[in-house]
Image: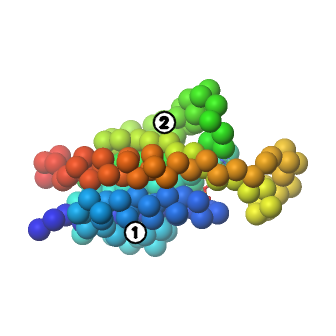
Amino acid sequence: MEEKILVAYASTYGSTQEVAEAVAAALREAGRTVDLRPMREVTSLAEYGAVVLGAPLYMFHWHKDALRFAARYREALQKLPVAVFALGPFNDKADEWQEIRKQINSELAKFPWLTPAVVEVFGGKFDPSSLRFPYKLIPALRQMPASDIRDWTAIGAWAKGLASILRLDPKGL
Ligand SMILES: Cc1cc2nc3c(=O)[nH]c(=O)nc-3n(C[C@H](O)[C@H](O)[C@H](O)COP(=O)(O)O)c2cc1C
């Protein structure tokens, strides 16, 4: 039977959730069976043959739901094919993207046993009018312009590529 893929996401303002929805849709279009769940609602990985972890970076760190999820499901994630995508950049400056790739790599280095088949960074969405406490107290953030640089074509293409990468390999089985 075809192994099910879990697309598990963390999202504070909803932009990563929308990307996770697009990733799940592209995988389904490519013929894979997919469950899409917020990380905090996942209770077991037993029924999955692969996992996609999608979470934004906040203040140089992986979203706290992702940090908790990775720690909690260490045993299963060690055995399953895993893909990771992170949201973060607000603009297309190459040096910022490079910096953000470093951020996600150093967050993933906290879980040396986690060996994703792919790690991708996508542009994020920022809306100063929806900032919550404590971020709305930071003038530099409030004064930043709204932006949404999520590249839906790149997201769809990446997800389509995952359909063949995320086959259950014999790792640990
Ligand atoms: C207060 C705040 C801090 C952020 N810190 C970072 C950061 O350190 N690195 C980064 O790449 N992106 C950072 N971002 C950008 C978010 O990752 C981006 O807005 C993302 O799309 C948010 O995802 P969500 O809507 O799913 O919560 C930050 C955004 C906010 C509002």
Name the mark on residue 36: 1
Q: What colouring does the structure picture have?
A: rainbow
Name the mark on residue 105: 2
Residue sitting at 31 percent across and 60 percent down? 27
SS at circle 1: strand
Q: Left or right of 17: which side holds 145?
A: right
N-terminal of the pair, mark 1 or mark 2, is 1
Q: Quadrant of residue 99?
A: top right
The residue mark sitting in front, 1 or 2, is: 1
Q: Residues within 10 Å of mark 1 (few under 14, many from 20)?
A: some
In the rendered image, the vertical position of residue 171 relative to residue 103, given as above or below: below
In the rendered image, the vertical position of residue 105 relative to residue 147, given as above or below: above
Q: Would you say residue 73 is visible in this rendering?
A: no
SS at circle 2: helix
Q: Position of residue 117 (x, y in %)?
A: 31, 42
The amino acid at mark 1 is Leu
